[in-house]
Amino acid sequence: MTEIKNNEYSLLKEIAQDSLVTQAGLSKRLDIAVGSVNWYIKRLIHRGWVKVSHLDRTRLKYDITSEGMTVFTQRALLYARDSLKAYGSFRAQAKNLVADLQKNGIQQVSLNGNDEMMDILRLTCLEAGVEVSDQPVEHVLEVCGNKYQLIGR
C-alpha cells in the first residue's frame, strides 16, 4: 500500500470537494502555511495523484487522478477498518463489564462521561437491561484511558 501523509490526505480530500479551491483557501481550511500547501501540492502532482490545469492567468484547477483516487480510497478504507476494530474492542469490553455487573446483582448505574466510548457502554447496558440513571447512583461507570471501570460513590 502506498504511504500517504496526513496533510497529503487532507489536501486530496479538500480538492475532491472543490477542484477550484485556491492554495490560500486550502491553507485556511487545513490550518497550514500557504508555502506548505504549495509544497504538498507539488508533491501530489509529482506522485501523479493530482493534475493541475490553468483556467486563466491567475486561476488554477486541481483534479485528482485515478491513481490519487486509489490512494485516497485506500486510506479511507483503512480508517474504516481501524474504526471497526476499535468499536469491536470497546463493545466486547462493555459486554464483559455489563456481564460482571449482572453477576454482582447491579441493575442500575450512572455514567461519568459523554463520548463515543460511553455511548457504546450506554447502549450495551440498555441492551442487557441494566438501567442507566441520569442521576448519581451508587455504581458509576467511567472511562480510564481506553478501559471502562466501575467506581462507587
Image (spheres, rainbow, N blue to C red):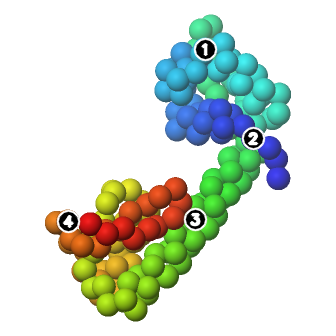
Disc sitting over residue 136 in the figure: 4
Query: Which residue matches tag 1?
Result: 34
Residue 75 numbered tag: none
What percent of the width, then of the height, locates residue 6? 66, 37
**Element on which disc 3 rests:** helix
Circle 3 Cα neighbour tier, 10 Å, few/some/many (<14 / 14–19 / ≥20): some
> 5 left or right of 98?
right
Mark 1 or mark 2: name the one nearer the start of the chain. 2
The residues bearing labels 1 and 2 have C-alpha atoms spaced at a distance of 20 Å
Question: Which one is earlier in the sequence, the residue at label 2 or at label 4?
Answer: 2
- Front in this rendered view, residue 63 or 116: 116
- The numbered mark, 1 or 3, whose residue comes first in the sequence reads 1
Q: Secondary structure at mark 1?
A: helix
Amino acid found under the numbered disc labelled 1? Val
Answer whether labels 2 and 4 touch (C-beta < 8 Å): no
Whether residues under marks 1 and 3 lie with C-beta atoms below 8 angstroms apart, the answer is no
Label 3 – label 2 distance at C-alpha:
22 Å
Residue at point 21%, 71% (across, down): 137
Q: CA distance from mark 1 to mark 3?
A: 35 Å
Disc 2/disc 4 C-alpha distance (Å): 46 Å
Secondary structure state at the residue bearing disc 4 = loop
Amino acid on which the number 4 mark rests in the picture: Pro
Which x, y percent locates residue 19? 57, 31
Say which label, 1 or 4, has the lower sequence index. 1
Q: Badges 3 and 2: C-beta atoms under 8 Å apart?
A: no
Residue corresponding to mark 3: 86
Q: CA distance from mark 1 to mark 4?
A: 50 Å
Residue 106 visible, this angle: yes
